[in-house]
Amino acid sequence: MTDDVLLAQTTRNGIVESSHYGAAIIMDAHGKTVFSAGDCATPIFPRSTVKALQALPLLSEGAADRFALPDTALALACASHQGEPEHIAVASDMLARTGYDYGVLECGTHWPLDNTSARALAAVGQTPCALHNCCSGKHAGFICLACSTGQEVAHYTRPEHPVMQTIARTLQDVTGAAHTAANMAVDGCAIPTWAIPLSALALGYARFASGIGLSPDRAEAAGRLRHAIAHNPTMIAGTGQFDTLVMQELAPRVLTKMGAEGVMIVALPEQGFGIAIKCRDGSVRAAETAAAALIARFARIENSPILAHYMRRPLKNWNGQRVGELRASPMLAEDFLPSAISDQT
Amino acid sequence: MTDDVLLAQTTRNGIVESSHYGAAIIMDAHGKTVFSAGDCATPIFPRSTVKALQALPLLSEGAADRFALPDTALALACASHQGEPEHIAVASDMLARTGYDYGVLECGTHWPLDNTSARALAAVGQTPCALHNCCSGKHAGFICLACSTGQEVAHYTRPEHPVMQTIARTLQDVTGAAHTAANMAVDGCAIPTWAIPLSALALGYARFASGIGLSPDRAEAAGRLRHAIAHNPTMIAGTGQFDTLVMQELAPRVLTKMGAEGVMIVALPEQGFGIAIKCRDGSVRAAETAAAALIARFARIENSPILAHYMRRPLKNWNGQRVGELRASPMLAEDFLPSAISDQT
């Protein structure tokens, strides 16, 4: 903790209300550290930030071609979606191409994270199914991979299943971080997850961003995934979400993915950089804010409305009155932090 | 930050995933510090934790008697409710007693925080009104106070309005912390809020818990509010909420109130203690967990199912599988932290 740095703070009328600490690191694909702040060595659970890496075998093993998956499906395989109708349609279509439906999914069921979509479901007397799970696209990709490689689909989320073995091997190869029983746990969607150093996560995304350091089949897969994500930012998250809004403005120069408990990755293909951030308290808002600052600074993007918004996000009350802001740490943003905005205006 | 202490951590299969730091203090009504950890001197915004203190004038100024407010209404005036039907009914009734309806409220409108209630509204084609705002009970109390004392109700949320002046004077008297322009901001529900030291917040609730150090009319008001809250824990928050669950099991021995951005207060009438907690990163889950530990230890409550639950809260995935836990810092809980529970069982 004492090694961590301030990532973001909220203020109310200019007075600090809450403070978020954590770590951030930027690596290139050769393993050079471009920027580092805080404890980037202690293993952290990357959560949903590894989804694009987990999707590499979907392409490199031939499943995407076998089932002729469109780019929307490839993007959804990398997504934490909000359960909006377009997400459900794509996930359902992915499964249909294998001959299965949502009954095969082992990710569990929850109401759409998008409240409007949840209320719309309720308004027509429906309840959610596993397709509405924010990880259903990733799991549909697992089903495609299992079917394409001739595996049983049952229990595909168990660590010993060939699909999970393939995913784990890919993650280890790309991030360079070994998986052991001692750093293994279960993720929110029931598949295994391994704690790895933040530096390894950044290295993995530098390789994903550039193709450098990947085998040719994985490099090609990474390129196709970058293309699919960049052209379908609404698939990755959804209405009003950081990843979607940032990529709608800045893809393909900037690709981002949030993870639960305050993790964030960014791939910067032009620079060949991977950025990994862990807010130690698990705050997603702080990870987003820190990411915006590092993107502006290290991708040298000035005058981006969406980055400016997230570097100094207005906090409003229920009357729409601005009462404070969430701002990135000046140490992260350097000269790229926008000027102070006035509270209560 | 360096003065703060670990309040709570999440683990996944025993591996630390996220850590929450902050401060906690326990005071008696004579100003004696019973326990202190972290930075309790820097002013913090108490947010909704001061609602019971803000409600004192509703009784001491005669408005509650004038409008014959039932205990449910007195409790709702101290609440951050979830917008469930019973909350809406009580808030609506409070306003009806003054001859007004929800159109007079200046707190703004949002969908019920309780998702089931929000979806139920949507299912019958309705949208929310200001009654569904989590602060509508407090605001209805302000309207009662304005009407009882012959004030105009318009602009009752402005700092210069007599109702806000009365509230501010009460807060300063009870907490002993002066309000100045330099520590003032606007709260989420549009009324003024002042940053005060955590120690002052704890002192205020020690006085609220015991009546000691309050004027006779405020001491009587505090007693009636304690009674109303203790007998209506569902009014204070709602289904599945910390405050409601803890008080359903432990009131009137334990009264609790959460506030936004990781603030929590506890009143322990038997001990005459007030507890105030600020999780520096704004996390409500951490403040709840720390509160459970301090309640068990300083109210000497052993074998409480609800406190044991919150001191080591299971984290489950969407299949209901236990994948980790949120646990209180052993430093706070001392001997009261329950034994480790096994993940993935």
Image (cartoon, coloured by chain):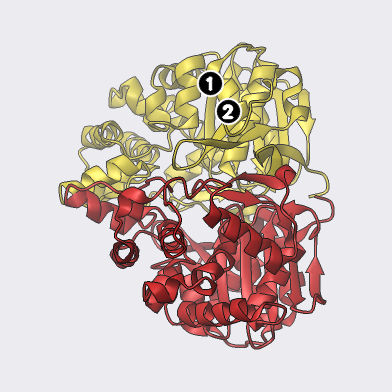
Chain colours: A yellow, B red
Task: Report the front residue among A27 and B172.
Answer: B172
The reply, left or right, for residue B318 in relation to residue A270 is left
Q: Residues within 10 Å of mark 1 (few under 14, many from 20)?
A: some
Quick one: SS at disc 2?
Answer: helix
Q: Which residue is mark 2?
A: A310
What residue is at 74 percent from the left and 78 percent from the top? B29
| Vertical arrangement, residue A247 with respect to residue B122, above or below | above
Q: Is residue A1 left or right of residue B302?
A: right
> Numbered disc 1: what chain?
A
Q: Which residue is mark 1?
A: A306
What residue lies at 75% left-to-right and 68% top-to-bottom? B25
B210 to B343, vertically: above or below: below
Indicate the chain on which mark 2 is placed.
Answer: A
Name the residue located 55 percent from the left edge and 39 percent from the top edge: A169
Question: Which kind of residue does numbered mark 2 sit on?
Answer: Tyr
- The local secondary structure at tag 1 comes to helix
